[in-house]
Amino acid sequence: MESEINDSRWDKEDLKRLDEFEESRNLVLRATKQLFLDFCNHNLKGDERVLEIGSGTGFLRRTMPYEVKEWVQLEPQIAFLEEAKRRFPEGSYICGYAGEIPFPDESFDVVCGYGSCDVLINLNKDMKEAHRVLKKGGLFFHMLDLHPCDKPIIKDFEDRHNPIQEFGNYKSCSYLETESISYIPEDRLEEYDKLEEIISKDSYSERTEKKIHRFWKKYGEKINTHDYFDKKIIQALSDYNFNSIEKGKLTAGFKGKRTEQQREQEERYFVFFNDAGKYSLYPDSTMYNIFQLKFPAMLNPLPMLHESAYRTLNHVFPSLARKIEPSCLEVSSIRYVKARK
Ligand SMILES: C[S@@+](CC[C@H](N)C(=O)[O-])C[C@H]1O[C@@H](n2cnc3c(N)ncnc32)[C@H](O)[C@@H]1O
């Protein structure tokens, strides 16, 4: 590994956070592997030199069921790189930032990221670097299976001096939970400033809180963080003359026996689902029928033991029910942006 870089936004403590991501990801890991394979079969040949930016502890490389000529993981946080190396010793690891990629021009056939470009504060400058190190005709792609990191979005609004509010549930991990951001638009800023002035003179009261709440409700513009990030990265890619820019959602499924983690999660859930930021478990009931409509190919022939049948069996012959392992369905759904140099 080259040099140690101090990044205050991502430190050793955040290893725990990456592991939290991974715990959720593991619920649909087999479906995600299928998704990666479909994507690679469609976009790669297998002889590529790949650079992954912001690779963290190496989830993408470790999960990727597709071989390429070389896969270099670029990551500023040395603790993450070391952990990635421990989990997957045969990889190539370089310590560095996306804004200063320590490679010459046109070194890579593919530059990619997984849940990483959304954390970049200088996304535009960083896409210039991605363009520089890509060979002509090379592929750039970024996949996002979480809600986009809100920090760069919040910073964009701070720079514009528009007050913002974040909405989400911060119980566990903010990247999984931040769903939307609301801001006061330019034409309401004056009014908002006046309100702030009144409020700062007022001591805290329920009345003042209600006033603010009403203002936000009436004038706050809600932004969807996914749409915001997609728009921003597509703008940056087109600023640097990337071609064939495309965004979309990839979905893949897997059906089979439950893993130990899935079994531990909850005895009666047989459907595991992630949808770009929302990891959930659904009981094998009405959702099962919805999935049947949505993904008929994955569910044919029907692999599931219905929850009601399982419950009856469990009631009448509990020891037999314990021996029968019901099948489960994993569905993995990931947003992506891709482009060619
Ligand atoms: C949300 S984590 C995702 C890590 C990994 N790709 C994953 O999906 O598990 C974002 C990663 O981007 C890295 N990062 C932050 N700023 C960066 C920069 N300027 N250049 C490259 N990577 C950066 C962080 O250290 C962190 O590992």
Image: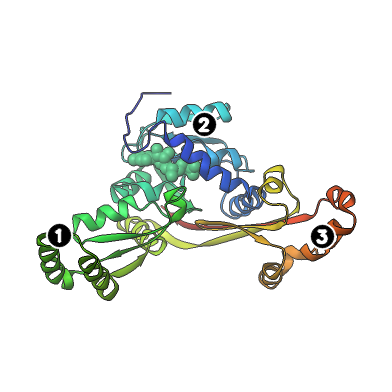
In terms of secondary structure, where does tag 1 sit?
loop
Task: Name which of mark 3 and mark 2 comes first in the sequence.
Answer: 2
Q: CA distance from mark 1 to mark 2?
A: 51 Å
Q: Mark 2 and mark 1 in contact (Cβ < 8 Å)?
A: no
Find ligand 1 in the image and state its quadrant.
top left
Task: Residue type at mark 3: give it.
Answer: Tyr
For the residues labelled 3 and 2, say whether their Cβ atoms are less than 8 Å apart. Answer: no
According to the picture, the residue beneath numbered tag 3 turns out to be 310
From the image, tell me which residue sits under label 2: 84
Residue 144 shown left or right of residue 330 in the figure: left
- Judged by depth in the image, the label closer to the viewer, 1 or 3, is 1
> Toward the viewer: 279 or 126?
279
Nearer mark to the viewer, of 1 and 2? 1
What number of labels is visible? Answer: 3
Q: Position of residue 322 (x, y in %)?
A: 84, 49
**Quadrant (top left/top right/bottom left/bottom right) for the N terminus:** top left
Query: Could you tell me which residue is drawn at 48 percent across and 26 percent down?
Result: 82
In which image quadrant can residue 86 be found? top right
Crowdedness of circle 3 by 10 Å Cα count: few (<14), some, many (20+)? Answer: some
Circle 2: residue type? Ala
Q: Are marks 1 and 3 in contact (CB under 8 Å)?
A: no
Q: Earlier in the sequence, mark 1 or mark 2?
A: 2
How many other residues sit within 10 Å of disc 1, few (<14), some (14-19) or many (≥20)? few
- Which of the two residues, 231 or 339, is positioned nearer the viewer here? 231
Q: Give the residue pinned by disc 1.
A: 203
Give the residue type at disc 1.
Ser
Judged from the image, the secondary structure of the residue bearing numbered disc 3 is helix
Q: Residue at x 75, y 64 (%)?
A: 299
Cα gap from disc 1 to disc 3, whole angstroms: 59 Å
Badge 2 element? helix
